[in-house]
Image (cartoon, rainbow, N blue to C red):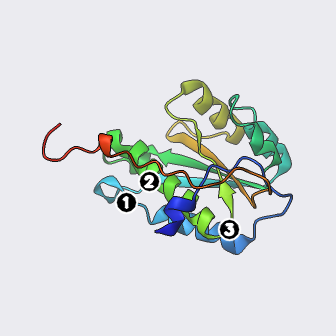
Amino acid sequence: MEVIFNRRSIRRYKKQAVESEKIEKLLRAAMQAPSAANQQPWEFIVVQEKETLEKLSKISAYSKMTAEAPLAIVLLGNEDRMTLQLHWEQDLAAATQNILLEAAHLGLGGVWLGVAPMEERMEIISEIFNLKDKIKPFCVIPIGYPEENQNNKFIDRFDPDKVHYEKY
């Protein structure tokens, strides 16, 4: 479980490509996520072209690092697979966390850039990739080998005051 405690949001990357074997491991980790009623509504776009990474860097004020990342994975929900419509975002969140944990395990770094439920961001992603109406953008994860000199020290976030037993 050490990877859980060592994972950090990484926003600066070396100019080193991510190997295809590692990309597949990231995607395999994503698809092992729990899913409501096993609906598995996820689909993924692997982005490595600089022009597209540049476009993704403009989806919000917080996505600029995407332009410098060697890789981004865009997570999507397919409505045709959503047997439980209200749970697709939970399913995609679990897949996102799995990608981030696997990235840390592989010596990579990434950061979760929220897209859904913000309609404006969802529309930008839909336009960039010419998505059908039934494909809903969830998030973007820029990924790469972490650049040195980032403050990635462990911070213990455990707070016993937030834990309640049997009642609130």
Q: CA distance from mark 3 to mark 1?
A: 24 Å
Q: CA distance from mark 2 to mark 1?
A: 7 Å
Category of crowding for the residue at label 2, using alpha-carbon neighbours closer than 10 angstroms: few (below 14), some (14–19), many (at least 20): some
Amino acid type for the residue under numbered disc 1: Pro
Measuring from the top left, give residue 1's x and y in whole percent: 46, 68
Category of crowding for the residue at label 1, using alpha-carbon neighbours closer than 10 angstroms: few (below 14), some (14–19), many (at least 20): some
Category of crowding for the residue at label 3, using alpha-carbon neighbours closer than 10 angstroms: few (below 14), some (14–19), many (at least 20): few
For the view shown, which residue lies furthest in the top direction? 120
Q: Residue at x 79, y 53 (%)?
A: 149
SS of the residue under disc 2: helix
Q: Is residue 118 above or below residue 139?
A: above
Q: Nearer the viewer, residue 86 or 142?
A: 142
Amino acid type for the residue under numbered disc 3: Gly
Residue assigned mark 1: 34
Q: Residue at x 32, y 48 (%)?
A: 83
Q: Residue at x 42, y 43 (%)?
A: 89
Q: Nearer the viewer, residue 80 or 18?
A: 18
Q: Is residue 144 above or below residue 111?
A: below
Amino acid type for the residue under numbered disc 2: Ala
Q: Nearer the viewer, residue 88 or 65?
A: 65
SS of the residue under disc 1: loop
Q: CA distance from mark 2 to mark 3?
A: 20 Å
Residues under numbered marks 2 and 1 in contact, where contact means CB atoms less than 8 Å apart: yes
Residue assigned mark 3: 107
Measuring from the top left, give residue 15's x and y in whole percent: 86, 58
| Residue 55 horizontal side relative to residue 23, left or right | right
Measuring from the top left, give residue 74's x and y in whole percent: 62, 48
Mark 3 or mark 1: whose residue is earlier in sequence:
1
Mark 2 or 3, which is nearer the eye?
3
Q: Residue at x 60, y 53 (%)?
A: 8
**Residue 94: numbered disc:** 2
Measuring from the top left, give residue 61's x and y in whole percent: 70, 28
